[in-house]
Amino acid sequence: MKRWTNLAAATLASATLLSSAVSAEPVVWAIQAEQLEYRVGEGSDIYAWDAGGFVGKDELRLVWRSEAEYAVDTDDFETLENQFRLQTPISDFFDAVAGVRFDTPQGPDRVYGVLGFHGLAPQWFEVDLDLFLSEYPSLRFEVEYEALITNRLILTPSVLESKYNSLSF
């Protein structure tokens, strides 16, 4: 009887140790560029990008997002937006985000607090809703859908709606 008790205890202990080692979630990271282009124009050539990255685990990630247009001739940013956000899941398909956004448009630099959520709605629609909090709050709502025309040709229509300076609390 004592032998079976010791064997059961050893099995339980090893299963506990192995299950905690197996369920230990690794830290993952990624970098993604949705738009990376060079635009040739009559007045000025422009570098443009929409990129980002993250580091963390499934339960909590630090996310960086950047969108910009850089004029080559004038050696100046036409637009520059960087966001640093913490992201955590709130359901199987949606994440809540909170962080800070830095804008460097023509004129003074602006800093916003960011609250929002994003995820995958039914029928594979990607939904992004962000509320930017500052002296002049704004709201951005974006919906995207990826339609596979062939395995290599993908149509991605998107709708972006932004409301600036019209929100009041």
Image (cartoon, grey):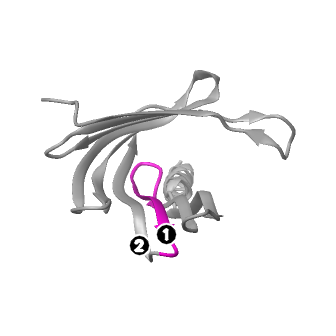
Q: Amino acid at mark 1?
A: Ala
The vertical placement of 89 against 83, above or below, is above
Q: What is the total number of numbered labels drawn onto the structure image?
A: 2
In the figure, residue 108 lies in which quadrant?
bottom left
Mark 2, Cα crowd under 10 Å, few <14 / some 14-19 / many 20+, is few
Q: Which residue is mark 1?
A: 71
Left or right of 97 in this view: 53: right
Q: Which residues are magenta?
A: 54-73
Is residue 130 shown to the viewer in this render?
yes
Asked if the stretch drawn in magenta spans residue 57, the answer is: yes
Q: In the image shown, does 88 or 72 lie closer to the viewer?
A: 72
In the figure, residue 74 lies in which quadrant?
bottom left
Q: Determine the main secondary structure of the stretch shown in magenta.
A: strand
Is residue 94 shown to the viewer in this render?
no
The vertical placement of 14 against 155, above or below, is below
Q: Amino acid at mark 2?
A: Asp
Residue at screen point 44% across, 31% down: 91
In percent of width and height, residue 158 lies at 58, 34
Asked if the stretch drawn in magenta spans residue 127, the answer is: no
